[in-house]
Amino acid sequence: MNKEWFKEYFDDIYLEVNKESVSFKRTEAEVDFIIESLKLDNTKIVLDLGCGWGRHSILVSKKVGCKIYALDLSQTLLDYAKKEAEKDKQEIVWICGDMRDREKYPLDLDSIYCMFGTFGYFDDVENIKVLENISYSLKPNGLFLLELNNFYKLIKFLSPKDVSSLTFSNGEVVYVIDERELLMFENKVRVNRKFFYLNSKKVVERNLIIRNYTIPEIKSLFEKVGMKIIEVYGDLKFNKPSIDSNKFYILAQK
Ligand SMILES: C[S@@+](CC[C@H](N)C(=O)[O-])C[C@H]1O[C@@H](n2cnc3c(N)ncnc32)[C@H](O)[C@@H]1O
């Protein structure tokens, strides 16, 4: 499989599926959590790392009025985000670039957030490089919020095969078949996803592979780049993490 799968995966199909499956209510709950955990106000300078179609950046900007940089590799998603921000009259600095590339990062940031399964796309060395870039980009004492899957729960309930269906905005009905495999020695999950377009009778295939980190592992990565974990939450209501949490929200400081 292509190691750089993420260069193609986040295209117009991802955008359509994601807009369909992520509700505004969920985005708003995530945004309220981002604002509170990072103590954002209109004096702060923030980076949305792997901002996608801008669902967080635009709402944070609307709610807080702080300066926001938003970095992503997918030009398709950034083009959509820019248009939405213009409609909402929000000024955001959109950066098209690879999170492994230090030169793409703004400097002296108060905070950075990285939401919705956007960490762990590379090998361990490059994943650390992303954290090094984050640390480099933050002011001293700057905060970083990272959403991670709870790997313990993920492996316990990993479903080898799932079928779902959705209807795109043009009326096209699409069946999605996911086949998942755990790579035990690497803590990675590989997903083969097939989209079956019922009306236009085409099949599109996508593969992704993500390195998952346990809390002790991520703690040691942060230590390597001179940062420390100051809090771990198990949900968007600031509850403690547990084996049943779907996600872990890691708050780290430079
Ligand atoms: C799962 S999406 C999450 C998007 C957004 N954070 C959200 O919550 O909707 C992951 C995002 O990371 C971006 N991405 C993938 N690889 C990247 C890379 N190497 N550098 C920068 N962004 C990348 C993708 O284009 C995509 O927008």
Image (spheres, rainbow, N blue to C red):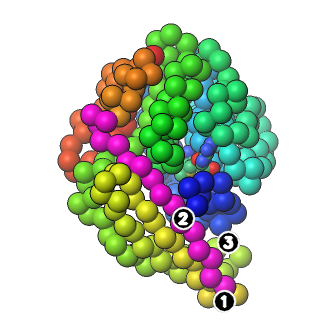
In reply to whether residue 213 is colored magenta, the answer given is yes
**Which of 166/3 is in front?**
3
Q: Say which label, 2 or 1, has the lower sequence index.
A: 2
Report the magenta stretch's main SS: strand
Q: Which residue is mark 2?
A: 1
Report crowding for label 2: few under 14, some 14 to 19, many 20 or more residues within 10 A (C-alpha): few
Asked whether the viewer can see residue 204, the reply is yes
Report crowding for label 3: few under 14, some 14 to 19, many 20 or more residues within 10 A (C-alpha): few
209 relative position to 229: left or right: right
Q: CA distance from mark 3 to mark 1?
A: 17 Å
| Percent x, y of residue 215 | 29, 37
Q: Residue at position x 48%, y 45% from top?
A: 123
Q: Which residue is mark 3?
A: 169
Q: Residue at position x 51%, y 71% from top?
A: 193
| Percent x, y of residue 12 | 70, 63
Q: Residue at position x 51%, y 61% from top?
A: 208
Q: Say which label, 2 or 3, has the lower sequence index.
A: 2
Determine the residue located farthest toward the left in the rendered image: 243
Mark 1 and mark 2 in contact (Cβ < 8 Å)?
A: no
Q: CA distance from mark 2 to mark 3?
A: 31 Å
- Provide the residue span drawn in magenta: 202-217
Amino acid identity at mark 1: Lys
**Which of 146/28 is in front?**
146
Quadrant for the C terminus, please: top left
Q: Say which label, 3 or 1, has the lower sequence index.
A: 3
The vertical placement of 155 against 34, above or below, is below
Q: Which residue is mark 1?
A: 201
